[in-house]
Image (cartoon, rainbow, N blue to C red):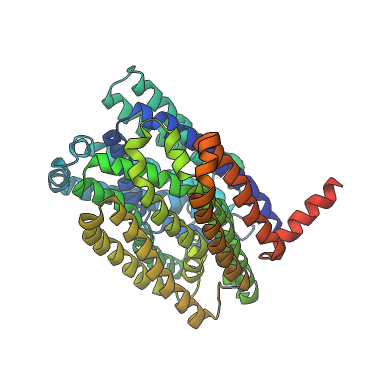
Amino acid sequence: MGVIVRQSIKGALANYLGVAIGFVVTFFVLTRCLSAEEVGLTRVMVDAAMLFSCVAQLGTNASLLRYFPRFDDGAGHHGIFGLALLVPLAGWALVAVLLLACHGWLVEVYSVRSALVADYFYMIPMLTFFMLYLTVFETGASVLMRITVPKVVREVGVRLFNLAAYLLYGSGAIGLDAFVWMFCGSYAAAMLLGLFYLLRITRGRRDLFRIDWAWLTRDRRREMWRYTLFMTATVLAGNMPLAGSLFLGAKAGLALTGVYTIAMYVANVVEVPYRSLGAIARPVVASAVGRGDWAEVSRMVKQVSLHQLLVSLLIFYMIWINLPALYSLIPNGAAYAGGMGVVLLLGLAKVVNSSFSIATDLLSYSHYYKAVLLFMTLLTLGVVVLNERLIPLMSIDGAAAATLLSYVVYFAAVLAYVWRRLGVSLFSAGQLKTAALLLAAFMLNEAWRRWVAPVTCGALGLLGDAAIKSLLLGGSLAAGVLVWRVSPTVNRMVSSKIIARR
């Protein structure tokens, strides 16, 4: 656990540095330099590339996590990194052919309300390739317990590269064509940095990507191939909530997709801690499952779920109580303020996903991994059907509601199955305490809004009110977590810090 803690802390710092940069870039540069329609274009391109890269992976990342302990026998890695390069390349070629075949139909779908997507559709296969191998190299570093630098590259490097593109376009130094190329090039640069880092931590071994076909017996290949193909469908389904922006682009236009995008950036902050903790915890959970150490598995997933719920709810609460002040600060904030409902619904969806995603990981590493396909199919159908039904009724709020409802149904089914088949429960008393504290905190915020805010806003303005409210209400919630001992681990950490300072 020492490695997990150290790498998680470093990864979280990298994530939050990226969040800080992303906050400035998104809310003070992106909204000034790009129109809502152009913001929507970047979102549709990124989400489409992410979905297609999930298909192109052909389950490679899941296979790396599941099979690395078997390949790594002390004598070498027996070519697992070579497979991680070769298989996605075949997957990407398949995706590129399918996109080419469907080009006419897809352009026709978007040309009515989102002409820019049709104009730059040819960039999506290239962006898919960059995102595909950026993820592959990041996963390679993750199984070697080195996640900090890849996190810096993804969370900080990409944002800085994008910042340069936004500023050049906003200043008129480059046109829209050059901007789109620079935007996609940001992911190309990050992909290359990920490759260089993987080579560095493996000391540039010449046999790193050489597949050991003698060691990779027919039975091993058959097992891995079945698992890899199976995980292709499950990983794709797990990323289907990204389709919300694609549905919006086709049904509501890029301007509203831009409003949705800014709201989604806010909600995504809730999920930041899980990006680091989850990335480093998954290989350890996979290893414990492989050893059959179910006591360790149960203990670990409970800890991950509790602390993810605790942290994500705290972040979500602080975002929600300060949301009006946030929208008042950003350039053209009035044009994007219609996304507040999206922040609420997507924020709750991120809380659910970050708190219980470890259950899906656990199931995929067990002998019951085939059941994941059934649940992912349920999630996919929920996303597609609910987006189709709710967007015409609720516009951008409908896309967010579709994501939240799909996650709730999906995780309810997964958690029940994990408990029945594996005898592992993610629930603990700490989670009930966290939910109770958050309910009380929301009631305090409502009381503040009705009776205190008129006074503080009148005297100090909206930002002054937000500062005082954050200090008092956020401090009260944090104090409640410590006094009620929601997490003994958190209490021990705070106590040790106090003792160390003395």
Residue situated in front as seen by the camera: 239 or 71: 239
Residue at the image point whose x is 41% and y is 50% from the top: 343
Res 400 → quadrant: bottom left
Residue situated in front as seen by the camera: 8 or 205: 8
Residue at the image point whose x is 38% and y is 21% from the top: 168
In the rendered image, is residue 121 in sight? yes
Q: Whole-percent x and y of residue 70?
A: 56, 64
Which residue appears farthest toward the top when viewing the image? Answer: 173
Total residue callouts: 0
Q: Whole-percent x and y of residue 371?
A: 40, 74
Q: Is residue 26 above or below residue 303?
A: above
Res 151 → quadrant: top right
Q: Is residue 501 left or right of residue 223?
A: right
Residue at the image point whose x is 61% and y is 76% from the top: 294
Res 77 → quadrant: bottom right
Q: Whole-percent x and y of residue 124?
A: 28, 41
Residue situated in front as seen by the camera: 323 or 281: 323
In the rendered image, is residue 196 in sight? no
Residue at the image point whose x is 35% and y is 46% from the top: 339
Q: Whole-percent x and y of residue 356?
A: 50, 65
Residue situated in front as seen by the camera: 16 or 420: 16
Q: Is residue 380 above or below residue 83?
A: below
| Quadrant placement of the N terminus | bottom right
